[in-house]
Structures are given as structure tokens and as C-alpha cells.
Image (spheres, rainbow, N blue to C red):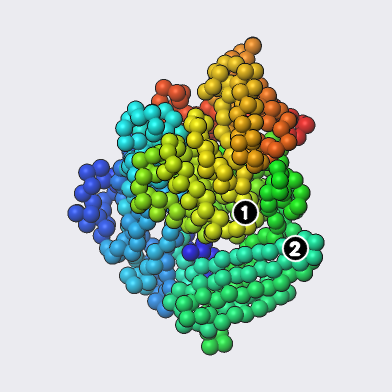
Amino acid sequence: MIKPQSNHLRQTQLLDGFWTFRRDADRIGEEQNWNLGFAGECELAVPGSWNEQRSELEQYFGIAWYSKSFIAHQSWQEHGVSVHFGSVQNHAKVWLNGTLVGTHEGGTLPFQCDLSASLVPGQENLLVVQVDASINPWDLPPARIQANAKNEGFHNSNPSVTYDFFPFGGIPRPVTLQITPEWERIDKIRVETALDREANHAKVSLTVSIKNSTATSVLLRIENDSASAAVDASGIARVNIEISSPRIWDIGSPELYLAEVSLQKDGKTIDHYSQSFGLRTIEVVGNSLRLNGRDVFLRGYGKHEDFPVLGRGLSLPLVARDFDLLAWTGANSFRTSHYPYAEEWYEFADRHGILIIAETPMVGLCERLFASEEIKGKALKLVSDMVERDHHHPSVIMWSVANEPWIESQKGTDFITALLAEARSQDSSRPVTYVAHNGIEINAACHDCDIVSVNRYGGWYDYPGDIETGTQYLGKVLDKFHSTFGKPILLAEFGADAIPGEHSLPAIMFTEEYQADIIEAQIAAAESREWVIGTHVWAFSDFKTGQSITRAVRNHKGIFTRERLPKMAAHRIRQIWTNK
Ligand code: BDP
């Protein structure tokens, strides 16, 4: 699948806007044929999570239906028409004019449905989506099976999920019609690059998959060079171009190239797609992470897709603002904790030279999930789907296959090891990691990481109220991880909650002073160890969580508030990272 695009042969039509909405708490919609259309209880905006758009939906975690009609142009009769969802949280069933056109599991990756067979050109067409956001112990990420089980995540909350963020429901990313000239079309593009900096030369290889193929060849153009390759019987063409004196993508010079891919049939171009990519190297050498042969130290944050009213919903002004604030603090990187974000985040990072650790939605995993072969199959697919969607972004420098799996047995280690192996087999050009749990001892899967990522909250969950002892403890933990695994270490999470406006002298927990001091002390402790390759503060901004006695309305570990106002820690970090 490729992201919809408009060009001289492809058209897009955005279906964002207000959609008709109706909850289906009793699950009667299918029986009552809501797929043919239904009376809405209200209108809701897409993209957007439903929870904060109306009070009565705030705590609704179940099935709901969305519908939207659009006029199909008469000329679409001869075209291929599909609908692309950036994501639907969590599961989706899609009907066009009453006919089921697709289903999808999982709330953080895109999917698309072919519409051509049930589309009525020249008339109004009705698109209906059933969204299932119910709290399910077997989803990835999962809900708890037992409300108070110790081994199912960090702390119990309502809704009872195994992870520390809010289980939003809805259609949080754009919905786009893609109209292609023919039924035959470019379906997937895999870009592989090999940059030889010494020889000042790069090789770019594209694997192009064609849907409904009878086309004969694919023509690739990159700036002034071009090459073509025949489409084989399975609908795949492999085409290479060599680039001499390549422009190298880097933090300060985010140089991008466009691969112009044309599908040829009977001497005619029948489809076209422009795929951006960058040329850079990223590798682990000894104790360092090297970008284009130079050591790079990661300074940044774990984040969430989260903002008041929008929930998980994509907002382009918010993307722009967050990148502005990242730069203001002197950060060079972030992790897409704890799931793949909307593609617009990675595209912005590509254009502005910010580094991303791209994470799967595998957070809050525990033994009962490790024991299921079915879950393992789904988890492996999530890794490969993420790599397929995001592999071409030069900003993505590392894959994180899971956050804090609660491993208690060899099965858990094997599960994570399998995910790491899958990421590596899908993409050998980037380091892989998973983020080891804050509170468990079995971390053997770290042996299979290129970088060992560690979360630790000394001075907060461990040694609360004591920054000095907490920081010494953090140092010991880092030393132990390094001596056990002999790999470079990323301090992937550390920090403290600060309720904005709370101050104290001396610094005590939950005040802005305490958060700023702990972050400063722990950045220094981590940076004093030459094998630490980065510090990612938890978190960039406050974010919504389930209700719990450990969360005062939300998680307050942001150095910005949920509305993106700076706390004292934001100013402190800016001072440390930029000297301003
Ligand atoms: C870490 C988790 C993160 C939480 C954080 C916290 O990785 O998702 O939000 O703890 O407790 O263990 O604030």
C-alpha cells in the first residue's frame, strides 16, 4: 500500500470533515443493516478521536458507526477507486453503498479498500464505517484480563488497560479517496539505498509491486537519471539507479530525493507515483551510534499523539508546533512511543532533519499474550506492516519492536527476540531495539538488540522524593545493563510528574522544580557514561490516561503541558541542550 497522492495521473479526494455518528453499545447495528445508512445521534469531526468531541462520548469504549456520502465523478467509471484510512482506532469494517468492501484490525496503521466494484459513478455514494474501540484483553496493545493483576502492566486504571495512555476511539487520521487512471496500478514501492560515502556514490533499488498487472514495464527517474525494468509474472519489477556525488541526508541538511515511478503499458504511461527518500547511513559501531559515519547523541523525548479535544486526531498545526518546540529545546530526536504515528510526522521529520525511533503498538505485553501463537502472528505482522509503511523515511533511524514487555519466562524472551528478528529481516539497514521494562529483571532479549534501550525512574518510582539516591540508582542500572549486554545504551525514559504551577523550595515531588532538577541530574549522569548514546526525557508533553490513583487527571511527566505550554523543565532542558 502507498499513501494516496495527486499527480498528472492520480487524483485524491479528502473525505475529512463532519461525519454522521452513532454509538452501538448493544451491537445491533449489523443486524439492523446500519451498513445501508443509519440515523446519526450527532456529527463528529474526522480526523479526530470521538472521546473529547462530546461529553457523553468521553468514556465510551465500544462500537460506533460513522457515515459520509460523496459524489463520484462520472469519469471514475473507467478508473480504479479506493479509500485509504490513515488509521481507525481500533478495528474497522467498511461498506460502500451497503456492500462490505474491507475490514481492518489495529488502530495505528493505514489500510485501504477497493471501491470500484460497488461505486456508482455520477451519483451520491454512501461510505459507512463500523469502528470497534472496545477494551479487549487480546488486542495489541491489550486491556487487562484481571483488573488488579500485578503482571498486567504498571498500575490499574479505568478503563483497565495494560498501558499508560488513553484508549481513544474513532477515525483519528485522514480518509482519502484515491482515483487511479486504470484498474491496474502501482500498489507498493520498496526503496533500498546503499550509500558509499568514500566513493561518493549511491545505489538506489526499487521493488515495485503492481496490482492487477498486465503492464509491461516500470520506468524509474531520479533527477537526471532513468532506468526501466520489466514487470514479471507475479506483478513485480525491480529497478536500480546509481547516483554519483549524492546529496546526503543529515540533521543539518535534510536532503531528499524523489523517485519518479511510471508504470508503462503498450508504450503508454498508465500510472505514476513520486516516492521521496534520502541517502544516509546509520550504524552501531562499538559503543556508538553513527549517522553518516559520525557519532550522534540522541537528545529528545518520548511523545504521544495527544492533544485536548483532538485526542489522537491528526492536526497539522500541532505537528508544526511540536517540531517547533522540539527545536526550541535543542532536541534532535523522538520516539513514536508507543505506536506508529500518522505519516505526516515522519514526512515533517524527513524535511527538517529530526531523527525518529519508530515504535510498534506493542506496549503492555505480558505472559498470557506471549503464550499465544495467534498473537505472535499478529505481532510479527505489525512489525512488518510498520517497516513497509515507514522504511523510506531517512528520519527513521531505528525500529523499536516493543515498549516494556512484562517478561517472566523464556516464552516472553523468545517472543521479543522473534519481533527483533522480524524487524531485521524486513530491513537490515537500521539498528533494532525494544525498550526494557522499568520494573522487571528478565531482559535477555536485549542480547538481540543493536542498542539496548532502558526506561528508569530513579527519584520517582524508585527512591521517590530523593533525586540524589534516585540518580545514583539510575547510574547503577545503566552500568549493569552495559556490563551485561556490552552494547550502547539509550536512556529511553526518565523523568517525573510536575503539575503545572506547583512550586516548592526545596524541590519536592510533583513540583516544577523537582521535575527540572531530576531531568538535569539524570541527563548529566547518563552523559557521563561514554557508551550512552542518548537521553530521551519522558515525556514531551502531558497526556491523557485512564483514571487512576496514580494519575491526577493525566500523566504530568510532560515538560510541556498538554496544551504545549512550557514548564520549568522545558526552560532547563533548553538551557542544557542549547546554552540559551
Ligand atoms: C513507563 C512507560 C510509559 C509511562 C511511564 C510513566 O513506558 O508509557 O507513561 O512509565 O509511568 O514505564 O509515566
Q: Residue 492, can we see it? A: no
Residue at left 34%, top 58%?
Answer: 103
Residue at left 30%, top 46%?
Answer: 63
Q: Which three-letter amino acid code belongs to the residue tagged 1?
A: Arg
Give percent across and percent down for residue 126. 33, 61
Circle 2 crowding by C-alpha within 10 Å: few under 14, some 14–19, many from 20: some
**Distance between the Cα atoms at labels 2 and 1?**
16 Å
Give percent across and percent down for residue 366. 40, 38
**Residue picked out by circle 2:** 196
Q: Is residue 61 left or right of residue 233?
A: left
Pointers 2 and 1 in contact (C-beta within 8 Å): no
Say above or below: 326 vs 386. above
Residue that protrudes farthest toward the bottom in the picture: 266
Q: Quadrant of the C terminus?
A: top right
Circle 1 crowding by C-alpha within 10 Å: few under 14, some 14–19, many from 20: some
Local SS, label 2: strand
Q: Quadrant of residue 502?
A: top right
**Residue picked out by circle 1:** 430
Say above or below: 237 vs 386. below
Q: Residue 333, can we see it? A: yes
Q: Is residue 164 left or right of residue 540?
A: left
Residue at left 45%, top 64%?
Answer: 177
Of the pair 292 and 431, the residue shown nearer to us: 431
Give percent across and percent down for residue 552. 46, 23
Say above or below: 503 vs 163. above
Residue that protrudes farthest toward the top in the picture: 505
Residue at left 58%, top 21%?
Answer: 459
Of the pair 420 and 36, the residue shown nearer to us: 420
Per the rendering, the mark at residue 22 is: none
